[in-house]
Image (cartoon, rainbow, N blue to C red):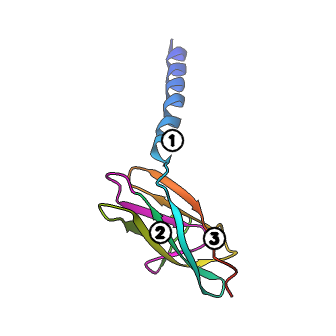
């Protein structure tokens, strides 16, 4: 009888743990797009992004694979550069600076407090010299 209860516990736990972990972070299409980019120095570029926030999601944590800066702070792959707050109505725009060419993955990730996120591969306009 103890073995049967133990097996039931293992089956229930294995069925619920992946579901709760998957529910924590969900890929979501905010419509994140690169609007503009321009060289700002040797091997670095500035970047403007736009997206449409959904109701209740106006604050976004930002991460970047190529060390883009948000308000002067370097974004890592696990964020660390702070948050970007969108207006209550309309399109959300964000300006990043100092994105490095040829170093790390050229991507930006936004995530809202509900755990929805979107990744975008970014591109410089050309080789910045």
- Give the number of callouts: 3
Q: Distance between the residues labelled 1 and 3?
A: 30 Å
**Which is more toward the observer, 45 or 77?**
45
The tag earlier along the polypeptide, 2 or 1, is: 1
Q: Could you say whether the residue bearing mark 2 is in a helix, strand or loop?
A: loop
Tell me the quadrant of the picture where the C terminus can be found.
bottom right
**Residue at image point 34% right, 59% down:** 58
Return the x and y of residue 16 as percentages of the image width and height: 48, 31
Return the x and y of residue 38 as percentages of the image width and height: 58, 80
Q: Distance between the residues labelled 3 and 2?
A: 22 Å
The tag earlier along the polypeptide, 3 or 2, is: 2
Q: In this view, does 7 lie above or below 54?
A: above
**Residue at image point 54% right, 73% down:** 36
**Residue at the left extreme?**
88
Q: Quadrant of residue 65?
A: bottom right
Residue range corresponding to the magenta coloring: 53-72
Q: Distance between the residues labelled 2 and 1?
A: 23 Å
The dot on residue 22 is: 1
In this image, 51 relative to 34: left or right? left
In this image, 5 relative to 66: left or right? left
Q: Could you say whether the residue bearing mark 1 is in a helix, strand or loop?
A: helix
Return the x and y of residue 118 as percentages of the image width and height: 51, 55
* Label 2, residues with CA under 10 Å away: few <14, some 14-19, many ≥20: some
Residue that carries the numbered disc 3 in the rendered image: 123
Residue 35 falls within the magenta-colored stretch: no
Q: Do the residues labelled 3 and 2 touch (CB within 8 Å)?
A: no
Residue that carries the numbered disc 2 in the rendered image: 80
Q: Nearer the viewer, mark 3 or mark 2?
A: 3
The tag earlier along the polypeptide, 1 or 3, is: 1
**Residue at image point 37% right, 52% down:** 54
- Give the overall secondary structure of the magenta segment: loop
């Amino acid at each position: 009888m103890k073995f049967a209860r133990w097996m039931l516990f293992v089956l229930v736990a294995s069925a619920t743990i992946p579901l709760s972990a998957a529910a924590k972070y969900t890929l979501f299409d905010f419509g994140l797009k690169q609007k503009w980019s321009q060289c700002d120095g040797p091997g670095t570029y500035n970047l403007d992004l736009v997206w449409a926030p959904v109701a209740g999601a106006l604050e976004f944590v930002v991460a970047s694979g190529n060390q883009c800066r948000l308000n002067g702070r370097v974004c890592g792959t696990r964020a660390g550069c702070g948050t970007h707050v969108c207006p209550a109505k309309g399109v959300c725009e964000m300006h990043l600076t100092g994105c490095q060419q040829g170093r790390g993955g050229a991507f930006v990730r936004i995530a809202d407090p509900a755990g929805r996120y979107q990744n975008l591969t970014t591109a410089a306009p050309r080789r910045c010299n």
